[in-house]
Amino acid sequence: MSYKFLDHATDAIIEVTAKDIKEAFAVAADAEINLTLDQDKVEEKDKKEFSANGKDLRYLLFSWLEEIPFLIITEGFAIRRIEFDIQENNGYKISATAFGEPLDVHKHNFKVEIKAPTFYDMEIRTNGQVYMRFLLDL
């Protein structure tokens, strides 16, 4: 399980490899959080529940990648870790709990604001292991 940032002039392109879909979504979340702030500096003092929905895995990934910066930027909640389940029933749903604390831009070394994920160049392959690539508009 890993992620890497690919070169791009103005946005962030992230590639994820994982053993299964759940691990891939966990890695994608960690990549997005660490792009925004230093996750290892966040303490687990509080929690927030959230969800993401999608008619397929691409829409689920898009929704998932929207929710995380919403928590960080809009709600001012720095995330240390996320526990979640993925359900499939006429589409997909993630039910999640984020653990962390109120965002402190200095303590958490706030780096960049993510405006939105995009469908441009998004890819998900599931053959043996899972490969994802997605672009975040900064």
Image: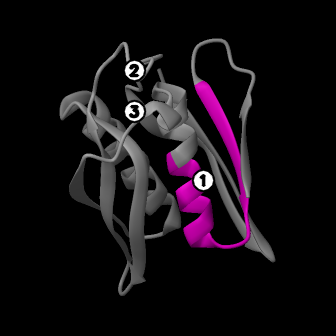
Pointer 2 with pointer 3, Cβ within 8 A: no
Amino acid at the residue labelled 1: Val
Task: Give the residue at mark 3.
Answer: 116
Of 76 and 18, nearer the camera is 76
Q: Secondary structure at mark 3?
A: strand
Does 126 appear in magenta? no
Q: How many marks?
A: 3
Which residue is located at x 47 percent, y 16 percent?
A: 111
Which residue is located at x 61 percent, y 66 percent?
A: 23
Q: Position of residue 120 (x, y in %)?
A: 57, 38
Q: Position of residue 54 (x, y in %)?
A: 37, 65
Sequence order check: which comes first, mark 3 or mark 1? 1
Which residue, as the protein is rendered here, is positioned at the far bottom? 89
Amino acid at the residue labelled 2: Glu
Does 17 appear in magenta? yes
45 vs 7, left or right, is left
Amino acid at the residue labelled 3: Ala
Q: Position of residue 135 (x, y in %)?
A: 58, 35
Q: What stretch of residues is rendered in magenta?
A: 12-29
Where is 13 relative to 127, above or below? above
Q: Quadrant of residue 69?
A: top left
Q: Quadrant of residue 51?
A: bottom left
Which residue is located at x 47 percent, y 20 percent?
A: 138
Which residue, as the protein is rendered here, is positioned at the far right? 128
Q: Residues within 10 Å of mark 1 (few under 14, many from 20)?
A: many
Of 67 and 44, nearer the camera is 44
Q: Secondary structure at mark 2?
A: loop
Distance (Cα) linking label 3 and label 1: 18 Å
Q: Residues within 10 Å of mark 2 (few under 14, many from 20)?
A: some
128 vs 60, left or right, is right
Q: Position of residue 131 (x, y in %)?
A: 73, 59
